[in-house]
Amino acid sequence: MNTKIKIVFLLIFSTAINAASKEQMIVESKQSIKQYASQLKARLQQGMKAGGPVNAIHVCNTAAAEISRQVSDQQGWEIARTSLKVRNSNNKPDAWETRVLHDFEQRMKKGEAIEKLDFSEITNKDGQHVFRYMKAIPTKGICLSCHGDKLSPDVAKKLHELYPEDQATGFKMGDIRGAFSITRHTD
């Protein structure tokens, strides 16, 4: 076989394998997000039942990071939440996440359903290939108790106590509250 043909064949074959691998990572990312979100939602619902939104804030403050660590450890990659308006400064978006979040906002303005907003890319970080994936988090009714523009005095007080630099309020139903973010080293 001619050397040029071999190179072209290898490039095409390599691209096909990389595309299949990326698609598999997207599927796995969606599964991890579903696992993380369902565990967090269950804990928040328990907190709401036990003591209303103020208790749910405390649960979120302690449980979100714990659940994130557990799912990340199980999957072997990092799963987190971020937003353009963060509640916890530890969740501040990096430059890539900021760009994707702004892109989500533009896509939603053009009519794309928030539930469909996701993005993946293989990037280079410190000389290593890194798979990145984000999926938008919609603001739903229950979210407004702690993220809306009309917070009860008790909720506002608890938020200020736990998150003195909180920016994650003022959302309305159907806004993009943030996104789940997955980082996975591929090398």
Image: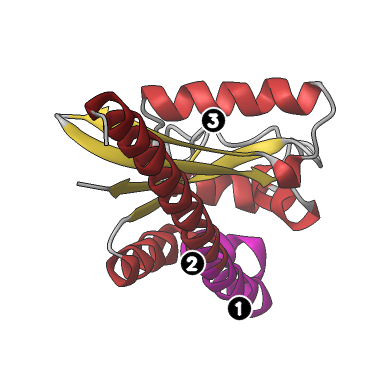
Q: Label 3 neighbourhood size at 10 Å, few (<14), some (14-19), many (20+)?
A: some
Estimate how packed mark 2 is, as few (under 14), some (14 to 19) or many (20 or more) residues with alpha carbons within 10 Å.
some
What residue span does the magenta drawing correspond to? 35-58
Of residues 15 and 100, which is closer to you in this image? 15
Closer to the chain start, of discs 3 and 2, is 2
Can you tell which of label 3 and label 2 is closer to the viewer? 3
Whether residue 6 sits left or right of residue 138 in the image: it is left
Does residue 152 appear in the picture of this structure? yes
Q: Which residue is mark 3?
A: 85
Does residue 50 show up magenta in the picture? Answer: yes
Identified by mark 3, the residue type is Lys
The residue that label 1 is drawn on is 46
| Secondary structure at numbered mark 3 | loop
Quadrant for the N terminus in the image:
top left
Report the magenta stretch's main SS: helix
Foreground pick, 131 / 92: 131
User: Residue 16 at x, y = what percent?
Assistant: 45, 44
Residue lying at 53% horizontally and 27% vertically, measured from the top left: 100
Residue 59 disc label: 2
* Residue drawn at x 70%, y 52% as measured from the top left: 143
Q: CA distance from mark 1 to mark 3?
A: 25 Å
Answer with left or right where residue 33 lies relative to residue 71.
right
Label 3 and label 2: CA atoms lie apart by 20 Å
Secondary structure, mark 2, is helix
Displayed quadrant of residue 51: bottom right
Dot placed on the residue nearer the N-terminal end, 1 or 3: 1
Where 56 sits versus 5, above or below?
below
Q: Say which label, 2 or 1, has the lower sequence index.
A: 1
73 horizontally vs 111: left or right: left
Occupied quadrant, residue 8: top left
Neighbours of disc 1 within 10 Å: few (<14), some (14-19), many (20+): some
Question: Which amino acid is tagged 2?
Answer: Val
